[in-house]
Image: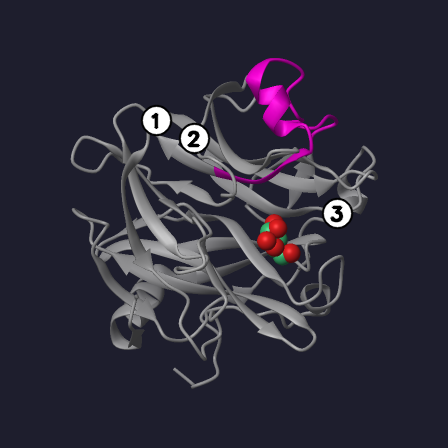
């Protein structure tokens, strides 16, 4: 491979979804969870409404690139109960994990108490059942593994503290509601493209060599933060064991709609769909404004974690 050949090939029709495709008032379309449901790809995307708060819309596609948006939003802040209190300022950055015939949805819930993560479930993308608020504030990135690990649910999450800033941890649960047994796995790496923050992006993907974790990393510049994507590989039987974190990023803002927009210089993923042919469709928000897509070969990404490694923490 040529040294500068990208591992992620951008789709020729990027951006694949913009606010012009949405039949209700929104300012942006970004940071979508995507999954294959039967013969359709379902995309659950975030939009800023014109008051600056976020909701989740739904779009469907036959080929994974050409999406049509539903006439109504998919998820808006809850109207009653405990979820109403904690979602009052908006719902953001939803991830979808296919799990034993249904789909687990994790999303950031914003309120005057801060940001925390809520869990909901659906089997048809029509009826959504809210299950629980599964973190305290301030925690906003949670991706659930698509299988139990040793009899327990597992997730990658991203707490923050002054001593260990914005790092990727793992936690486990017997019932999806109570989480614990947490361990720190991947830290931002000084003088690297992800030296300020790392956070889980797409739900982990099973490959022959391990769980592929496509994450975001942040670098602070004099002109603001730059969001890029990287990859790490976790042991299949024990994902708390990090087999490798790739030293280099796999995607950075380069197209005009990634470099300029609501928040400049951002590529941010919440979803990737593995295909039977060994490729993966990767989806990312460009500049917090539009949705983009690309493809990569799963083996290439997994190999990069093992052959071009840096320390995990
Ligand atoms: C993060 C989140 C993401 C967003 C990114 C870049 O902190 O708010 O939703 O895409 O910043 O603005």
Residue 209 placed where, x, y %?
A: 21, 58
Q: Work out whether residue 161 or residue 7 is closer to the camera in this orientation and state it.
A: 161
- The 10 Å Cα crowd at callout 1, few under 14, some 14 to 19, many 20 or more, is some
Q: Which residue is mark 2?
A: 134
Whichever of labels 2 and 3 marks the residue nearer the N terminus, that label is 3
- What is the C-alpha distance between the residues marked 1 and 2? 8 Å
Q: Work out whether residue 54 or residue 181 is closer to the camera in this orientation and state it.
A: 181
Q: Is residue 55 visible?
A: yes
Circle 1 SS class: loop
Q: Which of the 4 quarters of the picture holds residue 25?
A: top right
Q: Is residue 157 left or right of residue 45?
A: left
Quadrant placement of the C terminus: bottom left
- What is the C-alpha distance between the residues marked 1 and 3? 31 Å
Q: Which residues are magenta?
A: 70-95
Residue 102 placed where, x, y %?
A: 40, 25
Which disc is residue 176 wearing? 1
Q: Is residue 107 visible?
A: no
Q: Residue at x 45, y 49 (%)?
A: 202
Q: Which of the 4 quarters of the picture holds residue 303?
A: bottom left
Q: Work out whether residue 121 or residue 157 is closer to the camera in this orientation and state it.
A: 157
- What is the C-alpha distance between the residues marked 2 and 3? 27 Å
Q: Residue at x 48, y 83 (%)?
A: 4
Q: Which residue is mark 3?
A: 28
Q: Residue furthest top?
A: 80
Q: Does 42 sit above or below residue 258? A: above
Marks 3 and 1: in contact by CB < 8 Å?
no
Q: Residue at x 77, y 42 (%)?
A: 21
- The 10 Å Cα crowd at callout 2, few under 14, some 14 to 19, many 20 or more, is some
Marks 2 and 1: in contact by CB < 8 Å?
yes
């Amino acid at each position: 491979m040529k040294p500068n050949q990208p591992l992620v090939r951008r789709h020729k029709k990027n951006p694949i979804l913009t606010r012009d495709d949405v039949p209700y008032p929104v300012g942006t379309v970004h940071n979508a969870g995507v999954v294959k449901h039967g013969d359709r790809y379902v995309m659950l995307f975030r939009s800023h409404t014109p008051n600056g708060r976020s909701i989740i819309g739904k779009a469907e596609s036959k080929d994974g690139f050409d999406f049509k948006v539903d006439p109504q939003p998919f998820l808006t802040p809850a109207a009653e109960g405990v979820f109403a209190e904690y979602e009052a300022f908006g719902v953001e950055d939803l991830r979808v994990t296919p799990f034993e015939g249904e789909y687990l949805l994790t999303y950031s819930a914003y309120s005057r108490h801060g940001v925390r993560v809520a869990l909901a479930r659906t089997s048809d993308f029509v009826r959504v059942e809210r299950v629980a608020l599964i973190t305290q504030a301030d925690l906003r990135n949670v991706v659930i593994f698509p299988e139990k690990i040793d009899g327990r649910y597992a997730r990658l999450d991203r707490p923050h503290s002054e001593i260990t800033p914005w790092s990727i941890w793992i936690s486990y649960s017997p019932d999806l509601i109570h989480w614990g047994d947490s361990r720190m796995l991947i830290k931002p790496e000084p003088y690297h493209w992800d030296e300020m923050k790392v956070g889980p992006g797409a739900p982990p993907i099973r490959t022959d060599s391990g769980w592929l974790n496509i994450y975001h990393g942040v670098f602070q510049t004099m002109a603001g933060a730059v969001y890029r994507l990287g990859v790490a590989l976790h042991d299949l039987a024990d994902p708390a064991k990090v087999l490798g974190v790739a030293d280099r990023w796999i995607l950075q803002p380069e197209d005009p709609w990634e470099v300029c927009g609501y928040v400049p210089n951002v590529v941010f993923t919440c979803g990737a769909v593995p295909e039977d042919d060994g490729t993966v469709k990767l989806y990312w928000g460009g500049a917090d404004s539009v949705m983009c897509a690309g493809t990569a070969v799963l083996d290439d990404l997994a190999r990069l974690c093992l052959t071009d490694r840096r320390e995990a923490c």
